[in-house]
Image (spheres, rainbow, N blue to C red):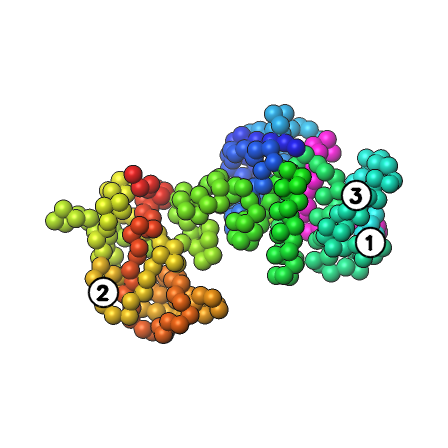
Amino acid sequence: MAQVEFKNVVKDYGAFQAVKGVTFTVEDGEFVALVGPSGCGKTTTLNLIAGLLDLSDGEISISGRRINDLDPKDRDIAMVFQNYALYPNKTVGENLGFPLRMRKVPKAELNDKVNQAASLLDISHLLDRYPRELSGGQQQRVALGRALVRDPQVFLMDEPLSNLDAKLRVQMRAELTRFHKELNATVIYVTHDQLEAMTMADKMAVMNGGVLHQYDTPERVFEEPANLFVAGFVGSPAMNLLPASRIERDGQTFATGDRWEIALSERNASCARRSTSDQIVLGARHSSITIHEARTPNCIPARVYTVEPTGDLTYVHIEVGETRLVISTDPQSQITAGQDVWIDLEQERMHVFDAKSELRIRPE
Ligand SMILES: Nc1ncnc2c1ncn2[C@@H]1O[C@H](COP(=O)(O)OP(=O)(O)OP(=O)(O)O)[C@@H](O)[C@H]1O
Ligand SMILES: [Mg+2]
């Protein structure tokens, strides 16, 4: 297995820069989830590693060896694409065995490996069918199987579970996690699914507009987002972000907005004082805000926009001026749309961001 290192990697498509100087290292055996909004450069990044695209600048190395100019077939990488690219004229069995046949693996070993992968992915009964005779989810599993049988240095996966139904996704997620642990494989995995990233990955790489905003464990990305973008992207629902101004009065620090003001705890006041201007943004997870139905001291007046029961939890969408927040409450709550409420931000779990630099200010 292998370590993958990015150094200031840049990719230009003509005048458009899709990857803007990305640096990070995937350690040997790590499972990294690459996340970010559509068009942020995830597939481009994978294609650069696989050698399907040339770098415009920077360097990629695998286990210390620079691979910029190495032929794709010499990189020992298996890629599972967003669209599965199966060979239409080969059966499922032939598709699975093809990478091994190219490497002249003996027939018995080839059959063993194909059967093993097919059983892992629950497609043993489909080995004689052609790709056109499969559902989207089944095709996706064949594509995964074809990567598995190769036992490469690095796996690159571009949303490999996106076409599966919810139940199969959960099952495949567990299978992939187990397979990663068993093979101790180095995996770079693109997903739109926050839960997949949080549950499967050792590290998360969060990209936006070709820039890598944070590279850290899922826990750290969730608990200590580097900036407003990461805070507003990671988590489902994402962190609530409330713009505010810092004011000092009578030796006390307050955050104020349009017709509201709350006193900040010493921890948050010291963060707010380190902002480059008096403009800050308060961040609060949906579970760290309490809703009161009557006026309560040091709370922010708001109006309920809509109430969304999901079974275990009810999400209450509220408006503070122009800002929409999502708060989780217990399903027994009697709160209804249009109601005036007062919200209480739990100070211990609150985050303070610098509105100008957009960076999170760490508590001291
Ligand atoms: N061949 C190309 N020529 C010009 N621009 C391209 C080309 N391929 C991709 N792009 C642009 O580069 C950016 C990054 O594309 P990329 O496919 O890497 O995004 P992505 O993060 O994988 O998005 P998605 O989540 O939708 O798959 C996009 O703005 C896209 O329009
Ligand atoms: Mg993509």
Q: CA distance from mark 1 to mark 2?
A: 65 Å
> Mark 3 sits on what residue?
113
Quarter of the image for the N terminus: give it. Answer: top right
Circle number at residue 127: 1
Q: Looking at the image, which residue is at 54% across and 33% down? A: 25
Write down the quadrant of residue 201 in the picture. top right
Instruction: Give the structural element (helix, strand or loop) at label 3.
Output: helix
Q: CA distance from mark 3 to mark 2?
A: 65 Å
- Visible residue check, residue 332: yes
Q: How many marks?
A: 3
Amino acid type at mark 3: Lys
Instruction: Give the structural element (helix, strand or loop) at label 1.
Output: loop
Image marks 1 and 2: residues in contact by CB distance under 8 Å? no
Q: CA distance from mark 3 to mark 1?
A: 13 Å
> Mark 2 sits on what residue?
296
Q: Looking at the image, which residue is at 72% across and 50% down? A: 120
**Residue 341's spot in the image, x, y percent?**
29, 68
**Residue 17's spot in the image, x, y percent?**
53, 40
- Neighbor class of circle 2 (other Cα within 10 Å; few <14, some 14-19, many 20+) is some
Tell me: 281 left or right of 182: left
Amino acid type at mark 1: Leu
Q: Which stretch did the figure color magenta?
A: 72-90
**Residue 303's spot in the image, x, y percent?**
31, 68
Mark closest to the chain's N terminus, 3 or 1 = 3
Quarter of the image for the C terminus: give it. Answer: top left
Residue farthest along the right direction in this orientation = 107
Q: Is 222 inside the magenta-drawn segment?
A: no
Mark closest to the chain's N terminus, 3 or 2 = 3
